[in-house]
Every structure is written in C-alpha cells, then in structure tokens.
Image: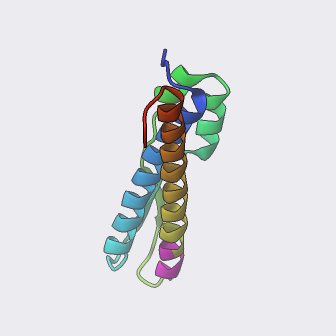
C-alpha cells in the first residue's frame, strides 16, 4: 500500500492516462491518411474515479490501456480538427495537474522545513 496521499496518487495516474491519450492522438493524426485507418483511444477517467473510491493501492494498480477506436473507410471524414481539439484539452489538463502536483510538493517542502 502506498504511503502517498490519495489525491497525489490519483493525479500521478491521471498524468499517465493523459500522456497515453496524447500518444494515441499523435498516432491518429499521423495515420489518418491511410485508406482503412483505425483510430486509437485512451479512456480512463471513469475507471480512475472508481479505483479512487477503493484507495491508493487500487489506483496504483489500475491499468490504463490503448483501445481500438472507429475504423474509417476511404470516403469517411477523418475530422483532424477534433483530434487537435482533443490534443489541446489533454495538454491543458496535463498542465493543470503538473501545476497542482508542484504546488502540493512545495507546500510539503515548507511544512517539513525546506526552503523554496
């Protein structure tokens, strides 16, 4: 069982999921021109919320995986604008979480007598 607070463990696992989502988006954008393109998705938020309800150990051991998405035919609209919008949302969430973790670590450092 982890000695880290649940909020920090959840934030770190969310960073893992967001990083994987960004990799999936990059693959989708790079391969969208292929005739029988199949997208890749990473959905983890609901599972992370459920794992958080069971504690830090459940969060730490929760798998986050790439999942097969829609298969596009040659004439299907690939909507790269939606992929790029998802990339922007993902990057914003990643930045917010890293900022929160940094602030939490700074407070912990101050609480134990460290300096900034």
Q: Is residue 6 left or right of residue 15?
A: right
The image position of residue 95, as x and y in percent, is 49, 58
The image position of residue 56, as x and y in percent, is 55, 24
Residue at image x 53%, y 45%?
103
Residue 79 sits inside the magenta stretch: yes
Q: Residue furthest top?
A: 1
The image position of residue 48, as x and y in percent, is 59, 37
The image position of residue 112, as x and y in percent, is 49, 25
Q: Main secondary structure of the magenta part?
A: helix
Foreground pick, 42 / 70? 42
Residue 78, visible in the rendered structure: no
Q: Is residue 106 above or below residue 39?
A: above
Foreground pick, 66 / 13? 13
Color encoding of the figure:
rainbow
Counting labels gives 0
Residue at image x 43%, y 32%?
114
Foreground pick, 30 / 55? 55
Q: Quadrant of the C terminus?
A: top left
Residue at image x 43%, y 64%?
39
Residue 87, visible in the rendered structure: yes
Residue 11 sits inside the magenta stretch: no
Residue at image x 47%, y 52%?
18
Q: Is residue 54 above or below residue 10?
A: above
Foreground pick, 97 / 103? 103
Q: Is residue 64 above or below residue 3?
A: below
In the image, which residues are magenta? 77-84
């Amino acid at each position: 069982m982890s000695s880290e607070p649940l909020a920090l463990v959840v934030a770190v696992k969310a960073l893992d999921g967001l990083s994987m989502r960004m990799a999936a988006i990059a693959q989708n954008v790079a391969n969208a021109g292929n005739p029988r393109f199949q997208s890749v998705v990473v959905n983890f938020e609901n599972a992370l919320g459920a794992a958080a309800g069971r504690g830090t150990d459940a969060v730490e051991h929760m798998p986050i995986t790439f999942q097969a998405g829609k298969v596009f035919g040659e004439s299907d609209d690939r909507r790269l604008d939606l992929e790029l919008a998802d990339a922007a949302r993902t990057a914003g969430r990643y930045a917010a979480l890293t900022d929160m973790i940094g602030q939490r670590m700074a407070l912990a450092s101050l609480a134990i007598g460290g300096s900034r």
